[in-house]
Amino acid sequence: MQIVFRSVKTNTQLTMPVTPAEFAVEVGRNVTVLDMSQTGEAAFPGLLALFDEQMEFLLPAEARNYTQGGYTGDPYAMVKTLTDWSEAGEVLRLIVTDTPVNFPILLGPVRYGEQDGTGDVYVRLTLRQYRELAAETSEIKSATGNKTRSTSRAQQAARVHTVVKGDTLWGIARKYYGDGALCYKLAKYNGIKNANLIYPGNKVTCPDKSKL
């Protein structure tokens, strides 16, 4: 197993000379818990989590029998590449060979130093998963059926939702915006003091997302 960092922009690659004894990444979706009036707590799927991990590496002062093949024995050259990536805010791929791990990341500040007079360098990297921001669009057919155009959801007209039994503001926000956590902004927009309290027959105006 090897741990590799590869620049998305330049395809420059660093293979860490010594693989640490362990590594861990955390992926999945956050869970949001709301205190629902009269019914107790309820859990809802939240936003996808971005892992934020630290890894420590040994950069030996010379190539040794336990270093990865091709290591030049120049630890500060590797430190310079890592710090250049961090300072430039460059998007990297974190690759752990022989595993499914292959994620886009950003490097936080690079901490490095020597400990025992051997010239070996110890480096600590803060890894933050990167996610590109992209506008959500939907394809809408024209009346003739022979053309399509991409229309931002933010450009749709405001909609009015009539609350029925079993509705929650979280569920309404998720239905119209794809994100239940917007229920608090939706409550504020509609002058609802408690996002957990809505009643059948209430009218909830759902404006363009950009207006929340």
Image (cartoon, rainbow, N blue to C red):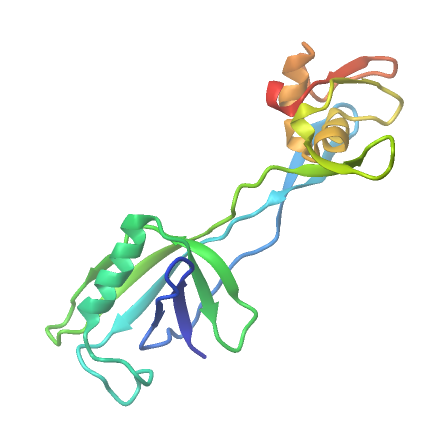
Q: Residue furthest bottom?
A: 65
Q: In which quarter of the image is the N terminus?
A: bottom left
User: Would you say 32 lies left or right of 18 here?
Assistant: right
* One can see residue 84 in this view: yes
User: Would you say 63 lies left or right of 212 here?
Assistant: left
Q: Report the front residue among 62 and 158.
A: 158
User: Considering only vertical position in the picture, is 148 above or below 111?
Assistant: above
Res 208 → quadrant: top right
Q: Which residue is drawn at 22% across and 80% down?
A: 72
Residue 202: image location, x then y, percent = 83, 13
User: Considering only vertical position in the picture, is 100 above or below 184?
Assistant: below
Q: Residue at x 31, y 52 (%)?
A: 86
Q: In which quarter of the image is the C terminus?
A: top right
Res 76 → quadrant: bottom left
Residue 194: image location, x then y, percent = 68, 16
Q: Which residue is drawn at 45% across and 67% down?
A: 23
Residue 149: image location, x then y, percent = 72, 36
Residue 42: image location, x then y, percent = 73, 36
User: Considering only vertical position in the picture, is 134 above or below 13?
Assistant: above
Task: Give the tally of numbered discs.
Answer: 0
